[in-house]
Amino acid sequence: GGGGFTGLAAARALALKGASVVVLEAGRVIGEASGRNGGQCNTGVAQDYASLSATLGADQAREYYKAYESAVQSVVTVIEQENIACDIKRNGKLKLAAKPGHYEGLARTCELIRREVDADVELLSAQDVRAEIDSNEFHGGLLQRNGIQMHVGRFGLGLADAAVRHGARVYQNATVKDWKANRGGFVVNTSKGSIQAGQLLLATGACQHGGLGWYRRRIVPVGSFVIVTEVLPQALIDQLFPHQRAYVTSRLIGNYFRLTPDNRLLFGGRARFAMSNSSSDAKSGKVLQAAMVQMFPQLAHVKVDYCWGGLVDMTSDRLPRAGEHNGVFYSMGYSGHGVQMSVHMGRMMADVMEGKAQANPWKDLSWPAIPGHFGKPWFLPLVGAYYRYQDSRH
């Protein structure tokens, strides 16, 4: 179930193995997080690498970092093999230190990453960063060269076309109501009728309907929001973003931004700890515009042409989860770093479903329910208030 990057990548991989594959999507393919994100596809874990290494140990942290490296390569491989025109750009990611203390943290992280796992990262001083980005807001940065940017809508439709071309059948507006185990595997009941399946893969992200109670108690759906400006003059682009990288800031409630191929600035972030709907998206758009102008006063009079939101499937430790529960395979919980990992895990879960359990990089992670969480995230405003407090202190 699920017609996002995970489900479609798994469908393509399984069809290439000769399996009979059906994708069931409640809405339209890539209509949720897969088609609503900022189009950044980079190496590196969602957490600070030094903290992850201290918590899990050097070996495990290295393996997880390498999983994201492999995931970026998975995306590139699919694009090249299927010849998907999705405006791919390979300019790396620059993480910007929002405070002097954040720069010190990035320096420690950079040293550890270089020593342990990836020599192709570079620490930039405040002066170096001014040559990268024309803003007074930042105190240095961490440049990771292994990263791409792309148009996720074009990539997603190209991936869906590829899956179908290789023999998968994709049903849109087919909401999965429930499933029941039987002698042949499972009978899956949908809004369009029932289907018999030998194996099931749930790739449902932050889905808020259907029989997903076990998963919803383990995933917090958090709204993430994006604005896109009008077309910017080339001279302004050359001044603000001469290297046109993918950019992220170091705050807990941070921002991410990049230039689109038609010279607009795409600027996103959590903005408000709220779910996504039309009024929430509009309020969040105003918050994002204010943050953009604070960072780049040169954009004070630039119009915003587009604004949208979507749900991020957050786990409590921001590491993905994949495996098998009650005979059903699943992969989700990408926690805002899903562009690369969802595509990669679709491919990996096709191997797992074939009996190759070792293909799953997240197989050893336990996944307890989040205490007090039953699917509706009543506590999001409290989390937002806590993060804002932490951002003001550290």
Image (cartoon, grey):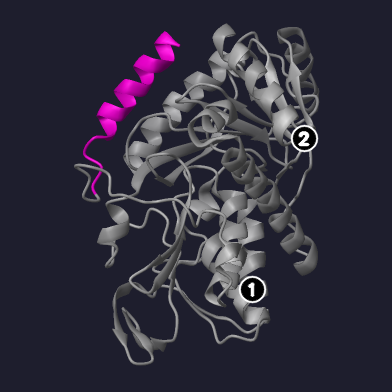
Residue 391 located within the stretch drawn in magenta: yes
Along the line of sight, the residue nearer the viewer: 204 or 131: 204
Q: Tell me: residue 302, above or below residue 338.
A: above
Q: Tell me: residue 291, above or below residue 168.
A: above
Label 2 Cα crowd, 10 Å radius (few <14 / some 14-19 / many 20+): some
Say the numbered circle drawn on residue 37.
none
Q: Position of residue 319 (x, y in %)?
A: 48, 44
Name the residue carrying label 1.
13
Q: What's the residue type where badge 1 is placed?
A: Ala
Along the line of sight, the residue nearer the viewer: 349 or 78: 349
Q: Position of residue 360 (x, y in %)?
A: 56, 60
Q: Characterize the magenta stretch by its predominant secondary structure.
A: helix
Left or right: 23, with 72 as reference point: left
* Residues shaded magenta: 376-394
Q: What's the residue type where badge 2 is placed?
A: Arg
Q: Does residue 344 appear anywhere in the picture?
A: yes
Q: Tell me: residue 317, above or below residue 1.
A: above
Along the line of sight, the residue nearer the viewer: 135 or 354: 354
Q: Farthest residue to the bottom: give it.
A: 183
The quadrant where residue 39 appears: top right
Residue at image x 79%, y 14%? 131
**Which quadrant of the rendered structure holds the C terminus?**
top left
Label 1 Cα crowd, 10 Å radius (few <14 / some 14-19 / many 20+): many
Say the numbered circle drawn on residue 145.
2
Give whichever of discs 2 and 1 has the lower sequence position. 1
Residue at image x 75%, y 55%? 76
Q: Position of residue 50 (x, y in %)?
A: 58, 26
Query: What is the CA distance from the residue labelled 2 to the residue labelled 1?
Result: 28 Å
Q: Position of residue 4 (x, y in %)?
A: 51, 62
Residue 332 located within the stretch drawn in magenta: no
